[in-house]
Image (tube, coloured by chain):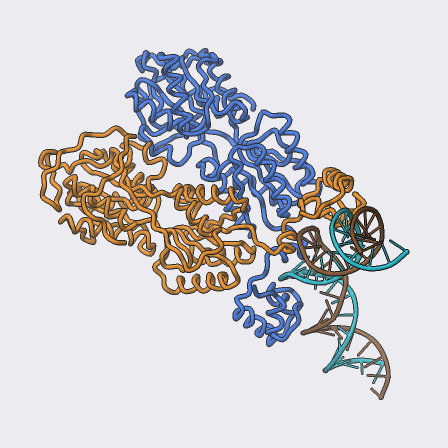
Chain colours: A blue, B orange, C cyan, D brown
DNA sequence: TCCCTGCGGGAAAGGGCTTTCTTCGCGGTA
DNA sequence: TACCGCGAAGAAAGCCCTTTCCCGCAGGGA
């Protein structure tokens, strides 16, 4: 591997001069020497050793990102936002998959610290696990103490700047939508209990169902893995336990798609017999059949905002940005089967509501709140 | 940021001893000193500077991966395979998205070279672009000359070890399936012309259609972006130009899903009026409606094999591993509408074929060839 | 008693680059 | 003619580790 001194020797100059030419230093260099150096670089196919550079230079340039799994559409979208801003600013991204393993997450924090990244961004759900939380916070604090910056996405249990999707209001919106469609027996396909995302979304949903007089008994909640197969399994369990269910909220779209698959395999018509509402609005959600009614989170923007926070040096106290959730109506949720459309009422107000016509798949309109969402 | 000498000083030992303790060197260290060092590490929250380590150590440990886009399911699956093997061997992965931009690809090769990775893996389609190909090959050669290893996935235009999906036979299988179902007017939703993946799959498909007496005139091929919207647009164009089309092959599943969406929006029943065959078998393909008949590529295994090749030091000449494609029958392809099932024939043999019953979504069986696929 | 061996620890030499500090040569001024 | 200042190039000091080499010491055999 050619080194800088190889280049310098070949060009007949000192390494200092070669370095100045290669890095476009502000110090002026004679044109002839410059030419000789560039020639030598080309001939030797010289590429600077990045580690030596990072060691010699003072300022850190790369940014570390820890996500559950980039290939999960939720994180893929967030990562897209992160990338965009990072690339704009000429930053290199180091992406690490924790696969929802707290230990691995801890390891990655250290790894990134060791790699001298300018900032660490943790995206994904937090854990209900005080010991682990304390441990991560300690490590992050140590990192911040040496000038590192920390930004979290959707993890209120960790310190540092934060970008928070409004999971709670999102859950609330899903509940309101179903209640307004006349559903009273609503089941929930929830993610793992230990994830704060699960509990936040669930809390909003529970509030909303309660407000609209529907209620959410514990036996109508099934906790499962946050993926397609988890959703299918939970849907099956829910249906077996409570055949009268008229609607289901899945706490993310992957699970909703699994639920749809299960319902199809049992020939349960959606939404005529059972309505399904998802969460996240992954890109594929509009392309399944029926197209998924879901709660949209501005994933790309969350990533972009997080990176912006992370790179914005001169920030004082930890900042928190909350990004709103929004209901996207498609075809998987419809009026509850027992009620004829004309009798659908808004439970909270008691006012009669005109039945909504079936909508075309992609004319998703955002919801206009008719009651105030909870503070999250 | 605490350094090794800080630790050593605090523990009252030399940096050499501290290093030995921290790295579990084979050289024995007195238990008391060891204890003091570990204590100092904990107190200072010391993490070794990875760049300094890489500079000081001789052996390279990280592996670089260049893909078009990790969040694309095709690459997500491949990456999963890469990760698995890399993690097993304790290697760190640096993943770079080229977003199908040749220049960016070139940049990343240099970047990875600069980061002293042990191997570079390029995944994705090659480009029909001799200048660019020569340039990349030069850079890769320079890298290999200094002991780096290069492995490509699905790019026969580049040198180095290679893992090749059998795109050509895959295309051939798609064609045969449709011909055996009685289709004669088959359209193609192709990816960008410059990608070798497009041309390889197309070539196999063309052969197969020709063999079965169907033919593929140029006006039945539409080139578009390799994504959902590209697929939808191409489907629209195809339908407008040739309303008699009874089947369509999309050269990847994303495009097929776009095509399905467009057909649905125009109320064209699939497969009763138009059959659709995809390519790749992404995980979501079984969950769309109708479930997608597609050509399966062992994506995860491709990644795993590629990483194995890259990490297998003592290899002589460039090795090439071809992984087979396989047809997965689901619900999006059915008999051609003009023919009643009883009259469906295998065009090549003229022998009557029993109509296949409609199959359940997920009982996807692999194809059993009835004729020999082309050598690819 | 002396020498050799082996063991545990430290000194120091890199590894490849950046950057400050020095030096050198030149033109201009007193 | 002597001196100063300035511009451009080089020398060298790090950046933070790893690892070789070396040294001192203790124990065992002759």
Q: Give the percent coordinates (x, y) of residue C23.
A: 78, 74
Residue in front for this viewpoint, A370 or B3: B3
Q: Nearer the viewer, residue B18 or A254?
A: B18
Left or right: where does residue D11 sit relative to residue A229?
A: right
Above or below for A163 versus B132: above
* Quadrant showing the N terminus of chain A: bottom right
On screen, residue A98 versus residue B133, left or right, reads: right
Please indicate whether residue B214 sits to the left or right of residue B68 in the image. Answer: left
Residue A321 position in % (x across, y down): 58, 34
In percent of the image, x 46 and y 26: which residue is there? Answer: A225
Q: Quadrant of residue B160?
A: bottom left
Residue at the image position 32 percent from the left and 28 percent from the top: A290
- Note whether residue A352 is visible: no
State which quadrant residue B134 falls in.
Answer: bottom left
Residue B50, image x, y percentages? 63, 49
Q: Quadrant of the C terminus of chain A?
A: top right
In the displayed structure, does residue B146 sit left or right of residue B27? left
Residue at position x 31%, y 55% in the image: B193
For residue B252, say whether it is visible.
Answer: yes
Q: Which quadrant of the figure has residue A291?
A: top left
| Marker count (numbered) | 0
Residue A24 point in image, percent of width and height: 60, 64
Which residue sits at x=53%, y=23%?
A200
């Amino acid at each position: 591997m050619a080194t800088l001194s190889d280049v310098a020797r070949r060009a007949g100059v000192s390494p200092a001069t070669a370095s100045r030419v290669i890095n476009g230093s502000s110090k002026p260099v004679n044109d002839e020497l410059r030419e000789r150096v560039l020639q030598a670089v080309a001939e030797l196919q010289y590429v600077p050793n990045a580690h030596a550079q990072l060691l010699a230079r003072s300022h850190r340039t790369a940014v570390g990102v820890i996500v559950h799994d980039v290939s999960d559409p939720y994180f893929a979208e967030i990562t897209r936002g992160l990338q965009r801003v990072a690339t704009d600013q000429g930053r290199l991204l180091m992406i690490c998959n924790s696969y929802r393993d707290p230990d691995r997450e801890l390891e990655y924090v250290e790894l990134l610290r060791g790699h001298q990244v300018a900032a660490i961004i943790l995206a994904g759900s937090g854990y209900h696990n005080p010991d682990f939380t304390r441990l991560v916070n300690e490590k992050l604090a140590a990192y911040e103490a040496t000038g590192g910056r920390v930004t979290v996405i959707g993890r209120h249990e960790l310190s540092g700047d934060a970008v928070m999707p409004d999971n709670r209001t999102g859950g609330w919106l899903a509940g309101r939508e179903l209640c307004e469609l006349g559903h009273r027996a609503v089941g929930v396909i929830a993610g793992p209990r230990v994830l704060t995302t699960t509990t936040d979304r669930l809390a909003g949903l529970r509030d909303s169902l309660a407000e609209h007089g529907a209620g959410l008994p514990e036996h109508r909640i099934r906790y499962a893995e946050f993926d397609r197969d988890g959703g299918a399994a939970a849907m099956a369990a829910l249906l077996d336990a409570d055949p009268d269910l008229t609607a289901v909220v899945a706490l993310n779209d992957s699970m909703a798609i699994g639920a749809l698959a299960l319902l199809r395999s049992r020939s349960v018509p959606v939404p005529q017999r059972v309505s399904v509402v998802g969460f996240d609005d992954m890109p594929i959600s509009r392309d399944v059949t029926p197209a998924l009614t879901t709660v949209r989170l501005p994933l790309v923007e969350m990533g972009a905002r997080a990176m912006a926070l992370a790179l914005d040096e001169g920030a004082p106290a930890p900042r928190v940005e909350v990004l709103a959730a929004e209901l996207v109506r498609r075809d998987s949720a419809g009026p509850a089967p027992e009620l004829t459309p004309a009798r659908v009422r808004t439970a909270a107000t008691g006012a009669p509501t005109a039945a909504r016509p079936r909508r075309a798949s992609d004319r998703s309109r955002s919801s206009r709140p008719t009651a105030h969402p909870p503070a999250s």
